[in-house]
Amino acid sequence: MDKGPGGSVVLIGFMGSGKSTMGIRLSYQLRYALEDTDKLIEARAGKSISEIFAQEGEEAFRQMETELLEKLAKKKGQRIYSVGGGTPVRAVNRPLLKKLGTVVYLRARPETVYERLKDDTARPLLQGQDPLGKIRRMMAEREEAYTETADVVLDVDGLTADQWVERIAGCIGL
């Protein structure tokens, strides 16, 4: 798929950075179909991501992610892609993400992520001791993969959803 004006947009970032919310907003604003890779994997596997992790392990899930990205890279048309927070961490996925379209890294501060997700009991990361510390460590570990993959880095703290859409559209020439 072509990058630049009129191409697809790939949203990456840590959980709670706004990928799903922004994907919906961009899809509506730009009239592009939205593809959420986590939801697509769940539909293909017939189970939730938590169940895949528990029953088959993280490596099996990561392989499913890579296979899905390979399939999506062959699709025609303009789309908004929202991918799981760990997708860019796997090196083989980075060039696949870039093939999909313009990669936008939604970067949030750890405190912002914590505030958005602190009441979400479905996120295993946030259960147990020191969830903010866990978020900080994981975000630091993933930062290089995110920035290496991104064509555009958007700091999302303090922005409204409308400002996000405006900035992303401006960055990708829409």
Image: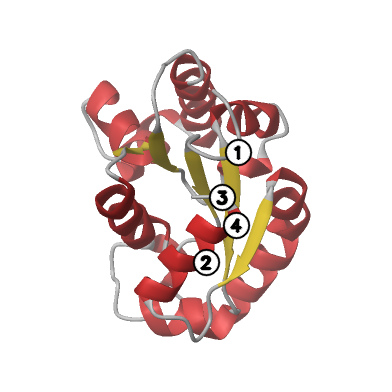
Q: Residue at x 53, y 74 (%)?
A: 156
Q: What's the distance in space between the residues labelled 2 and 1, CA to CA? A: 14 Å
Is disc 3 placed on a helix, strand or loop? loop
Frontmost residue, 28 versus 6: 6
Q: What's the distance in space between the residues labelled 3 and 1, CA to CA? A: 7 Å
For label 2, count other residues whose C-alpha is less than 10 Å away and answer few (under 14), some (14-19) or many (20+). Answer: some
Frontmost residue, 78 versus 91: 78
Q: Disc 4, disc 3: CB below 8 Å?
A: yes
Q: What's the distance in space between the residues labelled 2 and 3, CA to CA? A: 10 Å
Is disc 4 placed on a helix, strand or loop? helix
Expressed as whole percent of the image width and height from the top left, the position of residue 14 reads 54, 60
Residue beneath disc 1:
4
Residue beneath disc 2:
167
Q: Disc 3, disc 1: CB below 8 Å?
A: yes
Q: Is residue 130 visible?
A: no
Frontmost residue, 129 versus 19: 19
> In the rendering, which numbered label is found on residue 171?
4
> In the rendering, which numbered label is found on residue 173?
3
Q: Residue at x 34, y 45 (%)?
A: 50
Q: What's the distance in space between the residues labelled 4 and 3, CA to CA? A: 6 Å
Expressed as whole percent of the image width and height from the top left, the position of residue 9 reads 49, 42
> In the rendering, which numbered label is found on residue 12?
none
Identified by mark 1, the residue type is Gly
Would you say 55 lies left or right of 174 here? left
2 or 1: tag closer to the N-terminus = 1
Identified by mark 3, the residue type is Gly
Identified by mark 2, the residue type is Arg
Expressed as whole percent of the image width and height from the top left, the position of residue 30 reads 33, 48
Q: Disc 2, disc 4: CB below 8 Å?
A: yes
